[in-house]
Image (spheres, helix red, strand yellow):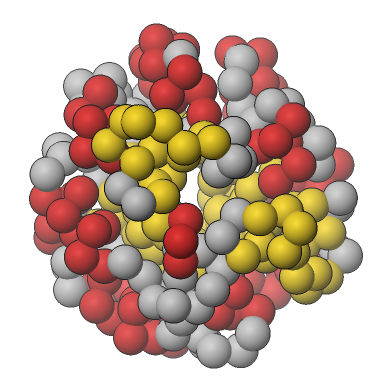
């Protein structure tokens, strides 16, 4: 199982939001590349980076910060936030990003996602962000009438690498990951699932790692690390021991 420490970008700074609310941002630093290096020093080989401003704008807003992260981090960078055109996808892959996360466009333009998945095998991750079981889009500002299971089924044979499932009601609140819903989604889909939202400590990592064979590919964690509630090196050790390690 992969542990993805998260770097969320807002105005070039490293932040974490509560429930995806841009007005409830906590700033953790103003040097994203330095933060990426710290994660690498702890042993991380994967990063999850989100251009929060881009998610709302529909196009890149923190490009310079992302470029600095990719340049300084020795492992794989997974990037999301406002990536909604073929040119944007191509540009990020050319820069050195390993995987692209697509959320809003996966709901509004599924053919675009399928086209990108065919063009970049193993490079596209579909974000299934849920509020009360329904898919949310546009930086989580809008909630659709599409259940998460239906969204997942749309991409099962499309060649996407994984599903990234976030329970918005828990994100950034340290309430604990919604393990039951994440495992249910993984068991009901042929696609691997990355858990996100609410990780509060090592127990969440341990519990998710027990379900690696159910299709849990990884877990994204941010605030718990920044607040000192989760030791990244310890989390990486537990994840590495799980069967089905990515």
Q: Position of residue 164 (x, y in %)?
A: 39, 46
Residue 36 appears anywhere in the view: no
What residue is drawn where x is 69% and y is 74%? 38
Q: Which of these two is toward me, 116 or 76?
A: 116
Residue 213 or residue 174, whichever sits in front: 174
82 in relation to 41, above or below: above
Quadrant location of the C terminus in the rendered image: bottom left
In front of the other: 36 or 103 = 103
Q: Nearer the viewer, residue 117 or 40?
A: 117
Q: Specify whether residue 183 is in view.
A: yes
- Picture residue at 74% right of the left edge, 30% below the top: 57
- Seen in the picture, residue 109 relative to 150 is either above or below; the reply is above
Relative to 51, residue 230 above or below? below
Horizontal and vertical percent for residue 33? 79, 60
Name the residue at 81% across, 42% down.
62
Q: Position of residue 122 (x, y in %)?
A: 37, 32
**Which quarter of the rendered picture does the N terminus lie within?**
bottom left
């Amino acid at each position: 199982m992969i542990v993805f420490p998260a770097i969320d970008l807002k105005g070039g700074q490293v932040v974490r939001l509560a429930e995806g609310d841009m007005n409830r941002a906590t700033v953790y630093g103003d040097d994203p590349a330095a933060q990426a290096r710290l994660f690498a020093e702890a042993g991380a080989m994967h990063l999850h980076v989100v251009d929060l401003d881009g998610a709302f704008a529909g196009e890149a807003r923190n490009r310079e910060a992302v470029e600095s992260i990719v340049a300084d981090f020795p492992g794989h960078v997974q990037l999301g936030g406002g990536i909604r055109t073929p040119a944007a996808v191509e540009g990020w892959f050319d820069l050195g990003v390993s995987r692209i996360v697509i959320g809003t466009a996966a709901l509004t333009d599924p053919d675009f996602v399928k086209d990108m998945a065919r063009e970049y095998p193993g490079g596209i991750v579909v974000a299934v962000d849920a509020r009360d079981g329904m898919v949310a889009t546009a930086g989580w500002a809008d909630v659709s009438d599409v259940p998460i299971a239906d969204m997942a089924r749309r991409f099962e044979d499309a060649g996407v690498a994984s599903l990234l499932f976030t329970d918005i009601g828990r994100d950034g609140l340290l309430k604990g990951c919604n393990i039951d819903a994440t495992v249910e989604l993984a068991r009901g889909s042929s696609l691997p699932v990355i858990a996100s939202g609410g990780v509060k400590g090592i127990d969440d990592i341990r519990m998710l790692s027990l379900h690696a064979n159910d299709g849990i590919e990884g877990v994204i964690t941010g605030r718990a690390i920044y607040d000192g509630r989760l030791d990244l090196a310890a989390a990486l050790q537990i994840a590495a021991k799980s069967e089905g390690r990515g």
